Image: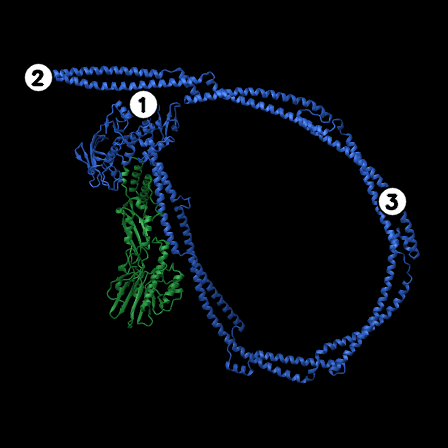
Amino acid sequence: MKIIHTADIHLDAGFAAAGLPASFANRRRQGLREVFRIIVARAGEIQADAFLIAGDLFDLARVTRDTVAFLQTQFESIPHVPVFIAPGNHDPCMPGSPYLTEPWPANVHVFKQPEWTSAPAPGRRLVVHGFAFDGWDISRNPFGSLAIEDDGAAHVAVAHGSERQHQPPDGQLYAPFDARAATALRLSYLALGHFHNATEIPANGTPMYYSGAPEGHDFSETGPHYYLEVDLDDDGVRVTRVPSAQIVYETRAIDCSSAASSQDLIDHLRALARSDVKLAARVTLCGSCPLSLIGELPAVKDAVAGDFEYLDLIDSTSPLEDYDELARDTTSLGEFVCRLNQAILDAPDPACKAALERAREVGLAAYRGQRIGIRGIELGGMA
Amino acid sequence: MRIRKISIDGYGRFINKNIEVGPGFHVLIGPNEQGKSTLRCFISDMLYGQKRSANLRAFEDSNELRCPWSNPETYGGRLVYVLDNGREIEVFRNFDKKNESLHVFDLTHACEITNDFEPLKNRERMFAQTHLGISKEVFLNTATIGHSSLEALGDADALDQIREKLLALADTGEETTSADAVLKRLEGRIGQIGQPAARTRPLPAARIRFAELNSEYERAQTLQQDLQQDEARRQQVIEEVGRLRRDLAGIGGELAALEKVERAERLRQADLLAQRIDESTRRLFELREAENFPLHLCPEFQRAELMCSTARNQFERLRQEYDRRKTEIASDLEQLAGNAGEISEEFDARLAAIEEKARGLRVRQEETQLALAGSEQRLATAELELQSLPDFSRLADDPMAWLSQLSTSFRVAQRHRDEMVDRAREHRAKVDQRNSLISSYDHLFAKFPDFENAAREYELRLRVREEQLAQLENALEIIQASADQHVDQAPDLRRLAIVCGALVAALSTVGYLMHNSGVFIAAAFALLGSFYFLSKWATARSRAAKAVKQLKDTEARIIELRDTEDEHCARMERRMVAASCQTIRELEARYDVYRKGRMELDAAIEAGAELESRALDASMRVAQMFDQYRVKLTDAGEPVSSEYDIEDAANRALGRYQTYRDAKRRVAENREQAVRHRASLDQVLAEVESVRREDVETGLAVRQLMRDAGYAEESRHDSALAALRSYRIRSAQSREKRRVLQQNLDEIAARVADEEEELKKSAKTIAEFLVGAGLDSVPQWHDRARQAEEYREMRRRLDALNEQLGAVLRGQDLRDLRAAVLDDGPVGDAARSSADELKRRRDAVSDEIDARVKEEHSLHLEITHRAGSARSLSEIEEERAVVEAQIRDLSLELDAAGYAMALIEEIARDKHSRIAPRLTSRASEYLAHITGDAYRDLLVSREMRVSVRIPQTQRMNEEPEKILSKGTIDQVFFALRIAMVQCIGETGETIPMLLDDPFPNYDDDRLLRAMKLLDRVGQTNQVLLFTCRDDVVRAAQTLQAPILRL
C-alpha cells in the first residue's frame, strides 16, 4: 500500500511576524499552493491508497474562499485517491470552518470530532483513524482513547499533536502525547503533524513520523523540507523523504573586516547562492569596515538580487574608528567622542546604547564631512 | 615640548641630514625647493606616522611622495625631542612599507619605551599624542602655520573667515570644519529623515502610512467579521430552505386527503342536479306550442300599440286647439289694421346732423374762452416780473459777455498774485534751510580761510612725529639689548675674576710650598687672567651704566615727544573730533561741502529778492481791478465786499440778466396769444347762432307730420328728433304682432294633419304583427307572448343545470365519479384547513423558498464581491511590519542625529566660552606688539567674532576689514593663531610651532616686530621659522636668533 503523508502547509498564512515584505509573502503564498499541487499530483500519479494530511492545511483566520475552491479542485483532480484530513490547531474544525460549511468532494474525509473516529479507505483493506482539533488548543492527551479492531485490515492514524520528547524548549504543547503510549496501539503507521521539520519518532513498534512542512515559512525554518511517501506491505514500512520545497530559507553572517571593497562582499554573497534551489537569505554583515563600503551596500544588494529569491542585508558593522584615541583629542570633536564613550558605557539598556552608538557615528561623520547612509531609507536596519 | 635633534636617513630630497635646534626661536633658511616643507613633514611624520587612519594599516599618499629619491630602504630617520619636564625622547622610524618599524627610547632613563604605548590597529603607537596631548590633525592644523593659511584670507569678510578658522581649529583641530558646519550637516540629515511637519519626508510619511495601514487593517478585520456574519447568515438561510421544503411536503399530503372529501361531495351535488334537470324537461314539453312564437317582436308590437294610442289622443287635442286659435286671430287682425301712415327717413338724418353740429360748436366755444383767459393771466405775470429786475440794457451792449470777461480777468490776476507770493515764500524757506546746514560748519571752517593748506601741514607734522617716535623706540630697544647683554656678562666676568684670583692664591701657595717656579708661572698667568676679567667686568659695568643712562635719556625724549603737543595738529584734531571724522581726509571732504554750500546760499538770496518784487506788483494790480469791478457789479444789483466775492457776484449778475431776458420774451409771446384767442371766439359765436335757426325750422315740419299720422304723443318730447324716434318704434311693434298670430295658426293646422297620418300608420303596423303571428286580436297576442317567455326561461334553466352538472363532474362521467368515490372508501376526519387555505399555504411556502434561495444567492455574491474588494489581512500585516521596522530605524536615526546635535552645540558653546577670553588677552598683546601699539585691543567674543579697536575713533569695530589693510588683517590672524596654539597647549605640554614663511605682506617694521614677538613666544614655545627670505634672516640677525641653513 502506498500512502502520501504531509502536514503544516499553512495555506494563506501571514508572513508579517517574520518581517517579510508583502510582495515576497504573496509569492510564497502562491508558492505553497504550488507545492501542495505537486504533492497532490504525485498522489494521483502513484494511485496512492491514502493521502494523509495531518493538520494545519490552512490558517483558518486567513483562509480565503479562493483557497477553499483551490483545495476542492485539487481533491477533485484525484477522485480515486482517498484523502483523510485531521484538522490541527491552525485549521480547527469549529463553527465557521470550511470543513463544516463547504462541500468537499466525495473522496475527501475530514475528521470532525475531537475524539478518535475511523473511516475506511474505499476499495482497500485500510482503515484510517483520526481526530480533529475543535478549537485553537487541545491540552489533553487524546491517544488514550484510540482502540483498534483486529479485523485483518491495515490500520493507520493521522493526527496533529506534540510528542513530548521532541517538543522544542520554548514551544507550547498541543494535544501532547508520549511515543511509548502510541506504540501500544498496533497501528501500522502514525502520520503526525505540528512540528515543521521532518522527524522520525523512534519507537518500538509503530513507525511514527512528522512529515514536517513541505516548505519553510520563515527564517526559523531553514534548510530542506519534504513530504513523505510511505510503502506499507508485509515486509514492513518504508518511508521516503521527498524534497518538496521550491525555495529554501537560509541565515548567514559575513565578517566585513577583511573586505577591501564592495566586490569582495558581492563575491561572498554570490558564493552563498545555489543553483539547485532558490534561496531566501538573511545575511548579517558584522565586523569593522570603512564607511565607504557601507555606503555601497544598496548597490551590492542590487548586484546580487537576481541570485536570490529574496535577500535581506542587515548592517551590524561597526566603523573603523579608535574612539578611545579620538576621545583624547583636545578639540570639541574629542570631547564629543569622550562624552559619548562614557554615555555608552553607562547606557541603561541596549536600545539606549544603540542610539548613543549611532549618535557617535553620525556625529563623527558630520565632523569629517563624510556621508553615511540613513538606516530605514537606504538599507535594512539593525537586527 | 621642543625638538632637539632631527636626523634624516632618507626622506624626500634629504639623505643623511642632521639638524640640531635649541629651545626658543630659530630661523631655518633655505631657497625654494630646498626642503623646508619636507622637513616640517618629517617632524610630523616622525611624531604621528604616515597611516591613513587609526584602524587601517594603509599608508597615506605622502608615503610615496616622501620616499627618498635614492636608497628607498633608508626611508626614515630619528627625531629627538625634550618634554617640558626635561625628559628626552628619541624616536626611530622606518617608513618603508616592507621594513616598517618604530622604536621610542627614553634617553633620560636610557630605556626603550615603545611598548609602554598602546598599539593601534594600524601598528602605530600613540606616544606623540600621549606626550603632546593632541592628535595628528590638531598638530598639523594648529602648530603648523603656513603662508597658505593666511593667503586664503580675502579682503571681503576677512574677519569672518578668521572667525570660521578659529572656530574650526577650536572645534575639530582643522581649519575648515567648525561646529557650526557640523551642526548644519546634522540638521540636513534630520531634514532628510523628516521632522513631523514635513509630511513627504521618509519618517513622517512612514508614520502616516503606518496609521493608514492600521486603519486598513481595522477595516479588513471588520470586513472579515462582517463576512463571517454574512456566511453564518447564508448557512442559516440554507437551513431555512431545507426546513421550508419539508413543510411543503407536509402541505402536499394534507391536500391529497382533502381531495377525497371533495370527490364525495361532488357526487352528491351531481345527483341533485340530475333530478332537477328531469323536472325542467317535462315542463318544456307542455309549453311546446309557444316554442316558435316571435317573442323578439313583442317590444315592437308594444311600441306600435303605444304609438297608435298616442297618435289618436294627440290628433283630438290638436283639432280642438286649431279651432280656438282661429277664432282669436280673427279679432286681433281686425284691431291692428287701423295703424298706418309712414314718415320719410330723411328727416331723421337731418335732425341728427343738426344736433351733432350744435354740440361741436359749444365745445369749441368753451375751449377758446379758456385759452384767452390763460394768455391774459400769463401776460400780467411776465410784466410784473420784468418791472422787478434791473435794466441791463444800460450796462452794456452784450451784458453776458461783459460779465464773463470781468470774472475771468479778475480770477487770472488773483492767481498770478498768489503764485508769485507762494514762490517767494518757498524760496525763503529754502534759503533758510541752506543757511542752517551751512551754519553747522561755520564753527569749524568760518574762521579757517586757508583750511586746505592747514590740512596738508597737519599731515606732514604728524608723519614727522611718528617717524621720530619710531626711531627713538628702535634705538631704545637696541640700547636695552646692549644693556641687558652687558648686565648679563658682568656677573660671569666677576666670577671668572674671582676664580682666577683664587687660582692665583692657590697656585702661589702650592708653588711656595712646593718651591716650584713653574707653578708660579701658572699663578702669574692666572693673575693675568684675573686682571683681564676684572678689567672686562669693569668695562661691562661701565658700559651697562652708560647704556642705562642712554636708556633713560631716550625714554625721556620719547616721553617728551609724546607729551609735547603740536598746537597745529591738536587744533586740527580737535576739529576732527568736533566733526566726528576719523581721518583728515574726512575733514577735508566736509570742508568741500561747506564751501560749496556757502556759494549756493548767496545765489539763492539774490534770486529771492527778485521774486519778492514781482509778488508785490501782482498784489497792487489785483487791488485796482477790485475797486473798478465793485462799482459795476453794484449797478447790476450785486454788491461786493471782498475780492473773493467778485466771481460769485459776476455769476449771480449773469443769472439775473438771464432772468431779465426771459421775462421780456414771455411778455411779448403772451400778448400775441391773447389777440389770437379773441378773434377765434368771435367766429365760433357766429356759427352757433346759424345752427340754432336751422334746428327750429326742421323740427316744426316733422312734428306736424307725426300729428297727421295720429301720433299725438309727440308733444311729450322736447326734441323733434326724440319724438320721431318714438313714433318709429311704435309702428314696428304693431307689424310684428300681426305676423306672429298668423304663423301660429298655420303651425297648428300642419300638426293636426301629421297626427292623423301617424294614427293611420300605427294601426296598419299592428295589423301586420297579428297576421304574422296567426292571431286575431291584441289580447291573443299577449297570452301567446307570456307562454313563449315561460318556455324560454325553462330552457335557460335546463342549460344552467347541465352546466353546473358539468362543473361538478369536471369532465368526468357520473358513473366514473361514483366509481372513484367507491374506490376512495370511507372518508376520514375533515381536514383542519380548507383546500384553498392549504393551497395558499403551499404557495406561500414556495414563495418563501424562492425568496430564501434568492437571498442565499445574493449573500453568496455579496460575500464573494466583498471578499475580493479588499486586501487580505496577511498582506496588510506584512506591509505594516515592514513600515514599523522602517519607523523604528528612522526614529533611531532621528534620535541619534538630534542627540549628536545637542551635544555638539553644548560642547562648542562651553569651549568657545572658555577659549575666547584667553584668546582676547593674548592676541591683543601680540597684535599690539606686531603693530607697534597701532592696534592694541582685539576682542574675541564667545561666538568667536573678532573685533578690533580703531585708534582714530577709539571704538571697537566689528567690521574693521573695511578699514584695515590686508596686511593688518594678516597680522590680526597671525596674532590669533599664535594665541590659539598657546591656549591649546596651556593644559598640557607646550607645543612647538613650525612656521612656513608666514609674513608675506609685512613691511620691514612690522616684520621686525613680528620676529620679536616670535622671539618672545620662543621663551615658552619652541618656534621654528622656515623661510627663504633674506629680510627675515636680517631681522633674525638683529634679534640674534639662531639661523640654520638647509
**Mark 1 / mark 2, whichever is N-terminal:** 2
* SS type, badge 1: helix
Crowding at label 1, few (<14), some or many (≥20) Cα neighbours within 10 Å? some
Q: CA distance from mark 2 to mark 3?
A: 200 Å
Chain shown green: that is: A
Name the amino acid, label 3.
Glu
Type of amino acid under label 1: Asp
Task: Name which residue lies at 90% across and 47% down.
Answer: B693
CA distance separating discs 1 and 3:
142 Å
Q: First in sequence: mark 1 or mark 3?
A: 3
- Identify residue for label 3: B687
What color does chain B have in the rendering?
Answer: blue
Residue B95 lies, in percent from the top left, at 22, 38
Which residue is depicted at the point 46% across and 61% down?
B862
* Position in image of residue B389 (x %, y %): 76, 29
- State how many labels appear: 3
Amino acid type of the residue that numbered disc 2 sits on in the rendered structure: Gly
